[in-house]
Amino acid sequence: MGKFINPFTDFGFKHIFGREMDKDILIEFLNDLLEGEHTITELRIMNNERLPETEQGRKVIFDIHCETDKGERIIIKMQNREQPHFKDRALYYLSHSVVEQGIKGTWDYKLAAVYGVFFLNFTLDEENRPNNNRNEGKFRRDIVLADRETGQVFNPKFRQIYIELPRFNKEEEECETDFERWIYVLKHMDTLDRMPFKARKAIFERLERIGSMANLTPKQRAQYEAEWKMYNDYYNTLDFAVEKGMKKGMEEGLQEGLQKGLQKGKESTARNMKAEGITPLIIQKCTGLSLEEIERL
């Protein structure tokens, strides 16, 4: 366990970004995220739980839900585990924040802008990128409602920003913008011996104090350590399952000819990984098989 907390545990994420008393950290991050568009001077952190309107409805819990001084709604979520329909889930979350703005009676349907900021500890659309390289391509995707032919923004009030952490591979000295410096710090925070960029931007000194293990209360430390153990166990289990599935599958498959054996090895690998509970998307990345081939196994 390092000098600083892991910001991608549930406790760590909300401890850094979700507390009213330290909301200046969230404001600075969002301003660097949206640099050149507009500046947030104040925000309020809202209740992150949304109850359904009917008994059949589904409760929604955001990691962080806030409103800026201009009335914009911003949903911020950290997702560690890969999900096959995460983009649909993100759309569902943002839609809640749109719909709840409705006013009974006479209303002109004017909406406040809704932003979704999604930190992902996995990558989207792996099958659409050449060579299956996890660090290839953009690490930030800005999704807007736009004209399909011209690319012109049709309505600026619904926006999704995905930050795919495995694709960010810059070193400290290679970071060119304050936003990149934020991502570097957050991605490596729990392994850092010192907090970089303090001389360049004062908020990183504040982040150093907030994120220091030494500054946690005994209760906070106990909660963090319990969550860190679950976080660490998940990734260790995932790595072991992938390694076990690949080893067993290749041993079985390589007993038959090179080409035939390679294909069979991939299929056997995929079959063993499925038995270990690995998701089809991860199996696809490890074996190179298509989702259809994996589904048939």
Image (cartoon, helix red, strand yellow):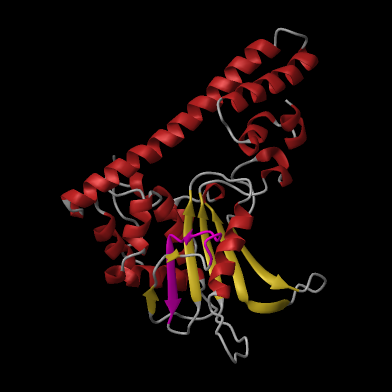
Bounds of the magenta segment: 54-68
Quarter holding residue 200: bottom left
User: Residue 87 lies in magenta, yes or no?
Assistant: no
Left or right of residue 190: residue 254: right
Q: Is residue 202 visible?
A: no
Q: Position of residue 253 (x, y in %)?
A: 70, 13
Q: Position of residue 240 (x, y in %)?
A: 49, 25
Left or right of residue 59: residue 20: left
**Nearer to me, 217 or 126:** 217
Residue drawn 72% across the image and 78% down it: 154
Left or right of residue 83: residue 9: left
Q: Count the marks: how many? A: 0
In the rendered image of this protein, does residue 221 appear above or below residue 230?
below
**Nearer to me, 58 or 214:** 58
Quarter holding residue 17: bottom left
Q: Is residue 11 visible?
A: yes
Left or right of residue 180: residue 162: right
Q: Position of residue 226 (x, y in %)?
A: 29, 41
Residue drawn 28% across the image and 65% down it: 206
